[in-house]
Image: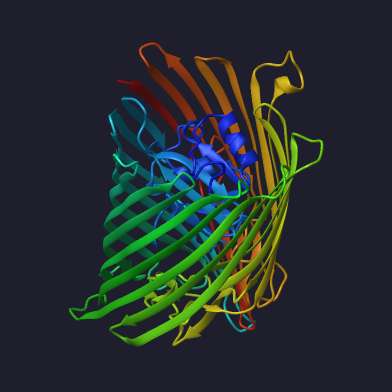
Amino acid sequence: MPAKKDDVVQTVEVAGPGASAQRKNDTAAKIVINAAELLQYGDAQLSSVLKRQPGISVVGNELRMRGLGSGYTQILLNGDAVAPGFSIDSIAPELIERVEILRTTSAEYSAQAVAGSINIILKKGVSSARKVVKFSLAHGENNWNPSLSLEVADKNAGFYYAVTGTLSKTGYENAPVVTESLDGTATQARTLRLIQQKNLADFWRLALTPRLNWELDNGDTLSWQSLIDYYRNVNWGRDHEILLEGDHTLYPDNNYRASSHTGMLRSDLNWAHRINADSKLNAKLGLSYNKRETDYNFYGYPQERVLPFNRHVVSNAIDSSVSSSGKYLSRFRDDHSLALGWDTALTQRSEARLQFDRQPGSSVVQDLNEDYKANVRRLALFVQDEWDVTNRLQAYLGLRWEGLNTETAGRLMPVVQTRSSVWSPVMQLLWKLPEQEKDQLRFALSRTYKAPTPRSLVPRRYTANNDNGPNNPDYQGNPQLLPELAWGADLAYESYFAKNSMFSLSAYAKRVQDVTVQNLYEKDKVWITSPYNHGTARVMGIEFDARFALQNWLLAAPPVEVRVNAARNWSKLDAIPGPDNRLTDQVPLTANLGMDYKPGEQQSFGFNFNFQTGGNVQVATGLRNYSGVSRNLDMYGLWRLENKVQLRLSINNLLHQDVLQASQYKDQDGRRLRSSVTPGSTTIRFQVEKSL
């Protein structure tokens, strides 16, 4: 957004007061998490860090703002939308300078942010030479996981460079227990099965973030920054079925082996040109490439334990994009900061899949050859203005037009094209209450949307190898999907009542049209689910966030800082019959309680308790899903030694609570219930950091 009093968007990286002041003074509501807070608990995954923030929930490895996932939460990398298939945990916290959480969209960024946006800013150069090496060793889920990171930066005259790299090995071993029951009509036998599963995985990852920056003689700056990420994973798993009543599945004993290689490159070239004292032009050219190759084998043994059925799948998926963006910033009349800009991108997903099936005891191989390609062309134009209406009232006004053109084609399908465009106005107001230097109100009104992903447009069939049913269906994309459109309003009260202390209470309401729901149906005795647009949803919620030092209330109290936040979310979808017709498995409640104790400059200790509810959700007619409550306790200790050495000990998921998931389908033919319990695991991590 345009800056005030000068024409440069300032980047503030100051622990504590800096982040708090930026949250207080920025017209657009945002929460800033600096590098120190990102590394505080020694987390290996960014999702583990962000789950402690207000309004953020984590389901699997998917981040959700206001409980909404599956594309409702926009992930940005240096201000640009990430490529489809991007995992936020592919970026180690050591590579990140700061994270910004934006509850309301802005005209500058893509309006694909119905729930909000999370902007990840990679590390840049520093003002002086810096060399830091870190080594950590963790044990959790029956695996030893080492990690090594190195950060090098230096500056010489008008040139600086910075390189941060990480090399890590992670893995897991878990043993879910699945219970499946089928209750038919009076003429059908009851079935009850117990399925013992075991899953193992190893991941090796290498990531680099090089950055070069030149300050040119005419005052221009040119910078190049990239993210290079490569990882390889090997998975193995098996199912052993114990029949308690009724009939076995087709393959009561089965196992799979899979290996994949994934490479990602993200590269941005930025140019900043000062036109005069009050105006500036920024332009960016970006390239992104992500390729995944997978080799998968499934072996299913019939009840007689003879030769197995074998399904061998070789597949690859490539996501690539080229983008261009820029903005003109100008300060005029001392109370307006104006920005005009563009944002355009071409994203392409190509997917090829070869499947070979061999029946038990047969030499005949049945093959299936599929390939698809989906192109998404996007063009956006925006204008925004930050206006100092009075010395106590600030306004942000923005308008963005964004057009989408999607084209899907494949070997077994004709070309399908869809076009859509969205006008996205946004208004944000910040009012500092009269005769109050610490209290203020915020209000925002915006229009956002959720675009279908290339994967959801491609009509490739993702098959369930065994036990296909309404609780475990095949999945197939829909090339006719359209964007979901949403209007939203936000209201917040904030009080910055003491140094490094604040309290915030906010509420929101949204109306979402053309919601993507699942069409569950049976065809040729095979259950399939496919997305389609249908209906309207109402979404609302409240949230509070507080941070304070105990010494604000009791001068004799120990140096303890307290963090507490909670968010309650509701939604109702009119296309699905109730009760529990919530939107996209919305997480109803999240809460955090954390404390940090700093007896001196050389030591600090802390804990965080995270609570997240699940409950029932009506997915489709007859189909209900259930997820259990999550309770997570993390602790850390940090010791700063001589010779620029730091030691950090952290314990994650100390309660190691089991993960419960269930699904129930009920119709006139009976009821089918499938539930799974995955034992939890505690991770202990020890880290050594040395400044060279």
The reply, left or right, for residue 350 in relation to residue 98 is left
**Residue farthest toward the left in the current orientation of the protein:** 363
The reply, left or right, for residue 432 in relation to residue 339 is right
Please identify the quadrant where the C terminus is shown: top left
Colour scheme in the image? rainbow
Relative to 498, say whether 342 is above or below: below
Residue 257 shows up from this direction: no
Relative to 554, say whether 90 is above or below: below
Relative to 350, say whether 23 is above or below: above
Q: Position of residue 387 (x, y in %)?
A: 64, 51
Q: Position of residue 519 (x, y in %)?
A: 54, 79
Quarter of the figure with residue 212: top left
In the depicted view, which residue is nearer to us: 352 or 471? 352
The reply, left or right, for residue 630 in relation to residue 239 is right
Q: Position of residue 55 (x, y in %)?
A: 63, 49
In the depicted view, which residue is nearer to us: 326 or 487? 326
